[in-house]
Amino acid sequence: MKKFRILALVVAMLMVAVLFVGCGGVDEDQYFAEGEVVTEVTIGWLGPLTGGVAQFGEAVNRGVQLYIDQFNAQGGLQINMIEFDDEGVATTAITGYNWLFDQGVTAIIGGVTSGPTMAVVPFGFEDNMPMITASATHLNVTVSEEGHVFTNMFRSCFIDPFQGQKMAEFANDDLNATTAAILFSNEIAYSIGLMEAFRDRAEELGIEIVAIENFPDDTVDFRSQLTNISRVNPDVLFVPGYIRHVALVGPQAAEVGLDTVLLGADGWAGTVDFLDDASSLNGAFFLTGFSSEVDDPLVQDFIASYQARHGNMPNMFAAQAYDAAKILVAAIIATIENTDYRPGSDSFRTALIANIAATNMTGVTGEITFDRYNNPQKTAVILGVENGAEFFHRYIY
């Protein structure tokens, strides 16, 4: 009888174990041990440190690292950041995301440009990985083409439709433009999205689009497209490109005798510093998320710290990256303080995503909250170029 009682007990225990497994039993590793204090959280950084868009990746990396170093210097909780150089290439970004995930990171700051970021977002969504980008502006970074919100993905930068629409309104309201041309890259998601938004809003405002020219990403000679545009003599020319494009378009536009107002978006940020002679951009305007001329102690302290470390002024990418790191670290602290989940666990990530979504803070780029698409609600800045230097023109709301 004893043998049968023991056998029955074993069978009962096995049944209970099966029931727990079937009900998704508790993974004890996701919780802190009693009395345990978290001293370090590891996050990942994904972006280009080499390749054609390395200048953006470097600025973003510097902004993120500056905030993390300042935070860690306070003592207590330490944020450990491990990096992966995606070279600005979508396939490499996917490799980098998977590598960071395998390292057990709790969250990822990145990517940097829109194409690679959009390539990794579906993987991050599937893995419930909290992510925030400082600079990927394409609409589909946080929302799929079908309208599905990637609830894990946030950004501290504006979206392309906002930028394109606002620059069309600026052309109409501030410059009284009645005709416009567009020069965009048909190989860059960022450039395409901006072109479409500017074109559609300009037409709604009654601005006639008299020319649309495109170029491959690796173009170095824009004279043919610019010559075509000069023939129709537009009031403004919208160039939604990156520094490497604008730095060539400006001088070549002057060379072919194109007399118009050049307009751009945040991909222009830092172009005047990239050129030995930026006078060809005189009279141009572009939308951005940061101005060093803002008289705010938070902004000026950030600028002073960045200059002390790197010897030059921070651009918009560095500023938005600084804010992205600030948003993420604040959400990590809130998650640690209000849950007993272990960093890196799925439960911690879920709570962290909710805390990022609840952000309401002041950053160096302004007051930041998130809408239902995880895009930031904040003001923008129009900068102009005169005497080869940027200057603050006005805010955009």
Image (cartoon, rainbow, N blue to C red):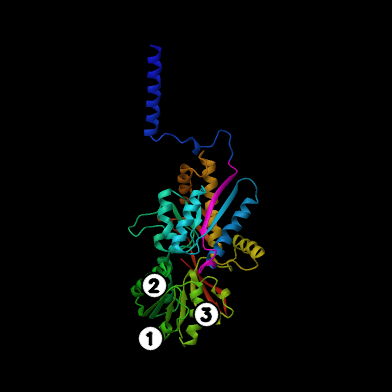
**Amino acid type indicated by mark 3:** Leu
Start and end of the magenta stretch? 38-54
> Which residue is the extreme one toward the top?
1
Above or below, 253 relative to 81: below
Q: Amino acid at mark 2?
A: Asn
Residue lying at the far left of the rendered structure: 146
Tell me, yes or no, whether the highlighted magenta stretch contains residue 84: no
Disc 2 to disc 1, C-alpha distance: 21 Å
Q: Is residue 355 above or below residue 51?
A: above
Could you tell which of marks 2 and 3 lies nearer the N-terminus? 2
- Foreground of the two, 232 or 86: 86
| Residue 364 visible in the picture | no
Label 1: few (<14), some or many (≥20) within 10 Å? some
* Quarter of the image where the N terminus is located: top left
Q: What secondary structure is marked by label 3?
A: helix
Amino acid type, residue under disc 1 in the picture = Val
**In this rendering, would 8 be left or right of 312?**
left
Using a 10 Å C-alpha cutoff, classify the residue at mark 3 as few (fewer than 14 neighbours), some (14 to 19) or many (20 or more).
Answer: many
What residue sits 59% from the left and 56% below the top? 67
Residues at marks 3 and 1 touching, judged by CB atoms closer than 8 Å: no
Residue at 46% x, 72% y is 241
Q: Kindly identify which residue carries mark 3.
A: 281
Dot in front, 2 or 1: 2
List the residue tagged with mark 1: 232
Q: Which residue is mark 2?
A: 186
Q: Please name whichever residue, 149 or 100, is drawn nearer the observer in this view of the structure.
A: 100
